[in-house]
Amino acid sequence: MCKPTPVASTETKKTGKTRRGMSKMALYLSASFAMLVAIFPMIISELIGGWTAKYTSPVYFTPKSIPDLTGKVAIVTGANTGIGYHTALELARKNAQVIVASRNPSKGQEAITRIQEATGNHHVRFLPLDLSSLASVRSFAQAFQALQLPLDMLILNAGIMKSPGAQFIGKNMTQGFELTQDGFEVHIGVNHVGHFYLTQLLRDSLIASAPSRVVAVSSIAEQGAYQPDGFRFELWKPLNVEHATSMGYEDGMAYGQSKLANAMFAKELAEQLKEHGVTAYSCHPGVIVSELTRYLVASIEEEALQKSWWSRMYLNALGKYFELAQMKTSDGALTQLHLAVSNVSELSNGGFYHPIGKLKGSPNHAQGSNEKLRKELWRETERMIKEAGF
Ligand SMILES: NC(=O)c1ccc[n+]([C@@H]2O[C@H](COP(=O)([O-])OP(=O)(O)OC[C@H]3O[C@@H](n4cnc5c(N)ncnc54)[C@H](OP(=O)(O)O)[C@@H]3O)[C@@H](O)[C@H]2O)c1
């Protein structure tokens, strides 16, 4: 008689082996997944200019690198919060006279109190500036000129982003559409036109204070400007949202267009003023946890509210996860501070920089180094400001 074959025990052995193999595999897969989840924010950070830039940039610049600025005068727009606040704070710490140029007097005053308490510098003052009104820009310039101060650093930092749009969140949005008091689409109006007009009005002060400099705060979002043209001048002063939408308006591209304008404006300004001892630079300061996304959050939440509880949780978690790739506001101020105070011989006049102080040369957008377009940008901005009665 044949002995019964020990089938069951062999199978058990085999199954046991397989289970052990599977559990090893599961362990391996979960460890790799966990590592990926942990490393992913670092990779994103490197791509967009998040916190890792502080460690990977070839330029070593910290607030301690700022020289003594006694006798120097700086205007920082949008200095009541975010990276503008930290820029004003660090300049004041090194004894510069700083003008906090903000649209909201109580927020401006509050920032000044905080800066004075932190630095002991009492030459920090507030002057009202609302970049969405050319009349306010003109009053600001007049008020500054009445102080009879030199102007060593003009830091064009204030900005508004109603939504980063399709390029970053994969969705076309027009909820952020708004017009400034002079009828400009709000992104181009505040971020570029207001700053352009301000610089024009302060041009003589900059020249008289040479060597002086202008820093325009752009963004990596410049590459999200309209394709392929970069600028859509017909969208600068549309009648209303329907009119704008019919011509292809989208919040993210409108923000991108304004940021491309910041960088190309700085380059053109550098060309025009180099004989006068005034230099100009632009930068993507990094991707920073600040109040810039306040309108985006509102528009996404508005949509999310109409979705399920699960979608809202998911969006929240995604937002928090993305913050792991971003910079603190104090680090976000470093690139513009570097451009404002480092020795000009270490900088490239008209250059576009990434964090922290990494020279990119020109913006990434295909039109970013188009000289003809740069000159057209200048002419069109001047023409539209004139047309608005200024
Ligand atoms: N955060 C980022 O990840 C990031 C990335 C790339 C580029 N940037 C650029 O960095 C700059 C500063 O942004 P942030 O992150 O510091 O943002 P933020 O915290 O929102 O600060 C923006 C500042 O601009 C001011 N502002 C807005 N509209 C204005 C107007 N009409 N007139 C005068 N001031 C106005 C704000 O004043 P209120 O407080 O009164 O609104 C605030 O002081 C912006 O130009 C932005 O485009 C930021």
Image (cartoon, helix red, strand yellow):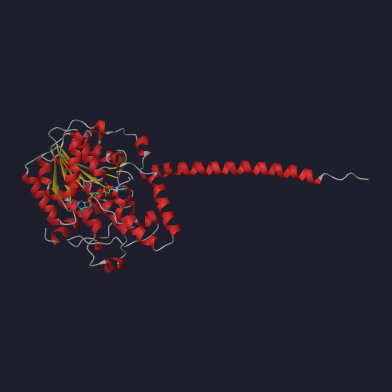
Q: Vertically, is 155 above or below 312?
A: above
Asked whether residue 309 is in view, the answer is: yes
Question: Front-most of 386 and 252?
Answer: 252
Q: In the image, is 75 to the left or to the right of 49?
A: left
Asked whether residue 281 is in view, the answer is: no
- Quarter location, residue 19: top right
Question: Front-most of 268 and 357?
Answer: 357
Question: Front-most of 235 and 136?
Answer: 136
Q: State how many labels appear.
A: 0
Horizontal and vertical percent position of residue 53 = 36, 39
Residue drawn at point x = 19 percent, y = 56 percent: 132
Horizontal and vertical percent position of residue 120 = 17, 34
Horizontal and vertical percent position of residue 85 = 23, 43
In the rendered image, the quadrant that contains the C terminus is: bottom left
Q: Vertically, is 119 above or below 76?
A: above
Q: Vertically, is 207 above or below 303?
A: above
Residue drawn at point x = 29 percent, y = 49 percent: 291
In the rendered image, the quadrant that contains the N terminus is: top right
Residue drawn at point x = 69 percent, y = 44 percent: 18
